[in-house]
Amino acid sequence: MAEAGAPPMHEIGVEAARRSLESIVRPEGPPMRSITDTGFDGPHGRVPVRLYRPLAAPASHAPALVWFHGGGMIMGSLSSYDRLARDLAEATGALIANVDYRLAPEHTYPVAHDEAYVALFWLHKQAPALGVDVTRIGVGGDSAGGGLAAAIALRARNEHGPAIAQQVLFYPGVERRCERPSMLDFGDSPFLRAADIDWMKNLYLGDDPSADDEYGTPALATSFTGLPPAIIAVGYADPLRDGVEEYGDRLREARVPTVQLRYPGVGHGFAMQAPTVARARAAMAEVGALVAARFSHPV
């Protein structure tokens, strides 16, 4: 991207950034037992959901993850995240419910958060019909979607919502940009620049950080006690690395069973690079095995 002179996202704008992501051609990925398009009526309208049932998933009492894709809260779709959903389903052996939440700037906070929370209720309600074990439903996401998943875990705890078996967070966006060492070292990456982080956060949350709360910015939570077990994966060269790892440290300090994984040689978004990057494939296999083990042996 650097050699091609890829411009910053905040310079090309939302629509061009969306077109760029959607234009990436990826191999189809692992075959599934079934892929079903469905959805639910949320507080802001109909929300599409795509269900991925892997070959290894049982027909009944299967584990499931409610998944929220990345894209900085401004881009991403069921199509552009199809490969990642397939990889997750195969690696975990769980049904993946990929949620096509509404994007900013057309829909600002808390729209996506509200839809993500209702998605958790929806899957719990639909569990019998989908052959899902209601005691083995987790939440997860990558990047901005990881931030959504973390926020849903907080809200479900605070409001005594549906049970969450585990939270699976790939390099989650849990805070606004901070001048941490990883941000200073890698904040000029052509894939994710510091200025782009500010731009995307402002489009979703607004320009005033003093108005943020823990559901829009999970790192603001004052207590992590009682949250579901977590698996957190981040790349060494990710500008978000230090903030992600501090979030994991705080979970552990609150006695939440937490696995933290740091992968060398990769940066932000590496889970999307499984078709071409060996370490991304290894990471997907390792995270998948941990997710499957936790579903098999709940804490």
Image: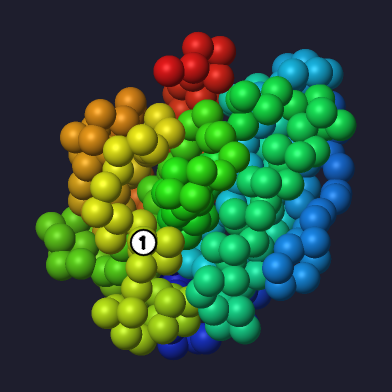
Colouring chosen for the image of the structure: rainbow
Residue at the extreme top of the image, as rendered: 297
The x and y percentages for residue 62 are 72, 21
Residue 187 horizontal/vertical position (percent)? 25, 66
Label 1 sits on residue: 214
Furthest toward the front, the residue is: 160
Could you tell whether 37 is left or right of 186 in the image? right
Along the line of sight, the residue nearer the viewer: 237 or 122:
122
Q: Nearer the viewer, residue 213 or 130?
A: 213
**Could you tell me which residue is drawn at 74 percent across and 26 percent down?**
132
Residue 80 in view in this figure: no
- Can residue 127 be spotted in the picture? yes
Q: Tag 1: residue type?
A: Glu
Q: Secondary structure at mark 1?
A: loop
- Residue 281 is left or right of residue 176, and the answer is right
* Above or below: residue 142 compared with residue 296: below
Image quadrant in which you'd find residue 11: bottom left
Q: Residue at x 76, y 52 (%)?
A: 49
